[in-house]
């Protein structure tokens, strides 16, 4: 089926940080990684310079393609910069899947 992988290093979290499943909310400088395989995107984050990757709340999430995983990665990076306990888009209760409402082009993040 294929795979894809995206990493953005040294992202400053906005106020409220990014929510993880294992350690609660992280703040400060973080690295964000999105891996895609078998129809799912898995988004992880770590404090810049630390070895341990943590799962971002809402991950893994269904993702139809490697291209869409890039769009998801860009959305997560923007959400982390905005803070407020950022999670992976597409949480329960949203009307459409995250990939039905994404930007047409990846950012240059």
Image (cartoon, grey):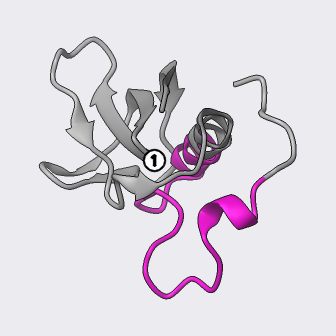
Rendered residue at 49%/20% (across/down): 7
Q: Which residue appears farthest toward the right when viewing the image? A: 104
Q: Toward the viewer: 15 or 23?
A: 23
Q: Position of residue 32 (x, y in %)?
A: 43, 30
Q: Is residue 85 left or right of residue 25?
A: right
Q: Is residue 24 left or right of residue 75?
A: left
In the rendered view, would you say 94 is above or below 24?
below
Q: Secondary structure at mark 1?
A: loop
Question: Is residue 33 visible in this depiction of the protein?
Answer: yes
Q: How many marks?
A: 1
Q: Position of residue 75 (x, y in %)?
A: 63, 47
In the rendered view, would you say 89 is above or below 74?
below
Task: Please tell me how crowded label 1 is: few (under 14), some (14-19), or many (20+) other residues with Cα within 10 Å.
Answer: some
Q: Position of residue 76 (x, y in %)?
A: 55, 46
Q: Which residues are magenta?
A: 75-102
Q: Main secondary structure of the magenta part?
A: loop
Q: Is residue 64 left or right of residue 50?
A: right
Q: Toward the viewer: 79 or 5?
A: 5
User: Dot 1 corresponds to which residue?
Assistant: 39
Rendered residue at 29%/26% (across/down): 47
Question: Is residue 16 visible in this depiction of the protein?
Answer: no
Q: Is residue 94 magenta?
A: yes
Rendered residue at 40%/50% (across/down): 17
Q: Which residue appears farthest toward the front when viewing the image? A: 1
Q: Position of residue 109 (x, y in %)?
A: 69, 25
Which quadrant of the view contains residue 94?
Answer: bottom right
Q: Is residue 65 magenta?
A: no
Rendered residue at 33%/34% (across/down): 45
């Amino acid at each position: 089926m294929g795979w894809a992988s995206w990493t953005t290093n040294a992202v400053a979290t906005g106020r409220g940080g990014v929510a993880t499943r294992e350690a609660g909310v992280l703040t400060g400088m973080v690295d964000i990684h999105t891996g895609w395989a078998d129809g799912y995107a898995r988004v992880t984050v770590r404090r810049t310079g630390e070895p341990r990757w943590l799962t971002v709340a809402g991950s893994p999430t269904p993702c139809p393609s490697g291209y869409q995983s890039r769009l998801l990665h860009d959305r997560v990076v923007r959400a982390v910069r905005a803070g407020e306990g950022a999670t992976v888009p597409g949480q329960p209760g949203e009307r459409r899947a995250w990939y039905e409402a994404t930007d047409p082009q990846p950012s240059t993040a």
